[in-house]
Amino acid sequence: MIETPSLVDQYCHGVLRTELGLGTFEAQLSRTEGPPAPGTTLFDTQTGFAVRRWCPPLLGLEPHCTPARYLARRRELGVLESARRLLRGSGITTYLVDTGLPGDLTEPGELASAGAAEAHEIVRLELLAEQVADTSGTVESFLANLAESVHAAAANAVAFTSVAGVRHGLALAPEPPGPGEVRGAAGRWLAGRGVGGELSDPVLLRHLLWSAVASGRPLQLHAGLGAPGLRIDRTDPVLLTDFVRATAGLGTDLVLLHGYPYHRHAAHLAGVFPHVYADCGAALVRTGARAATVLAEILELAPFGKILFSSGARGLPELHVVAAHLFREALGRVLGTWVAEGAWSLSDAQRVAGMLASGNARRVYGLD
């Protein structure tokens, strides 16, 4: 049996503090541009079935119980107690939390307390820039304050993360923009944004990426499936190849998040470039009962020291649970088969499982 006693969730968000009805729960369960089609439910997805398999027992119900029965039990326990039971039943011992999403989500400290775990902050670059812009009156003050904010964040956060692929696409020019180019782009953006406007200018996105690279903290890059309505052909991690090559040897690790359905491309980049790592978690949540197949495809291409687990969970503690259980089950099935076939020794399989579950993340993010 392949054992992974503890997991480091290298990328997730907080969980909602509010009670959820059927409709609002489904909206968090699967990210779509609207409600499910009439007469259908988002529980009838790989993720929905995985929630019904793994989460009810943690709340005292039988596996595969109906959504209505599950949500009634959830309301009976209350949102705080339900989250506590679910998170503590996941086996995740360390959370790395992107705090850059809006909504009534728990902060890292709250997540750690609920889950009886450790938690560390990941700083989202685009939100950081938007917050700086809201309090900076001129281009010069914006750029100076942004540089200071990135430096201050690097002193406390374990990593930076970027949603440049979501905001613009990953086919960005690979080189850092020049000072004049940055000032011009900042002036145009500040003049047209108003308070709270999102950053999507490609020059400023590149400036943020290179500011993070200069900090030396690991930089996480979102790729593959993401926001509803996103053109996923713009988020294929292979589009980052020139940027990856330009950042080689600078001392900053790049972590390609999510990746699916381009997980093989992410694994390939992790295999070619020493400073690139591939995430294997969120893809498993999406694929449910097919998770072992997806994990095996990642293991085809990426060195085993370059693959990290995450849940990618946001809003629902159920997604942390599903990610952890699907990862353990998929890892046990894939590596266990290779051991049974004689391709791997049990000791090697157990060592690699520990690397993927927590060891690689602890090394990359300096958690020890």
Image (spheres, grey):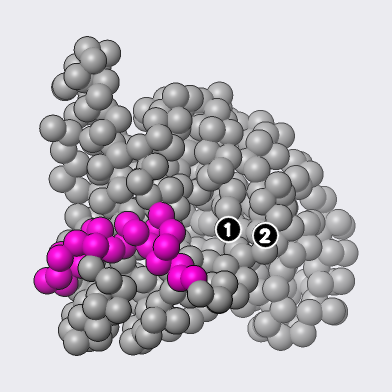
Residue found at x 87% / y 57%: 180
- SS category of the residue bearing label 1: loop
Query: Residue 337's spot in the image, x, y percent?
Result: 25, 24
Residue 50 is inside the magenta segment: yes
- Residue sitting nearer the eye, 290 or 124: 290
Q: From the viewer's perspective, is 236 left or right of 86?
A: right
Where does residue 320 sit, x and y in percent of width and height? 32, 61
Secondary structure state at the residue bearing disc 2:
loop
Q: List the single residue furthest toward the front.
A: 39
**Magenta region, residue range:** 40-64
Q: Residue 230 carries which label?
A: 2
Compared to 15, does 284 lie above or below? above
- Mark 2: give few (<14), some (14-19) or many (20+) Cα within 10 Å: some
In this rendering, the count of numbered labels is 2
Q: Which residue lies furthest to the top in this view?
A: 342
Q: Can residue 326 be seen in this view?
A: yes
Residue 226: mark in rendering: 1
Graded by Cα atoms within 10 Å as few (under 14), some (14 to 19) or many (20 or more), the crowding at tag 1 reads: some
Where residue 86 sits, quadrant-wise, is bottom left
Q: Is residue 87 left or right of residue 297?
A: left
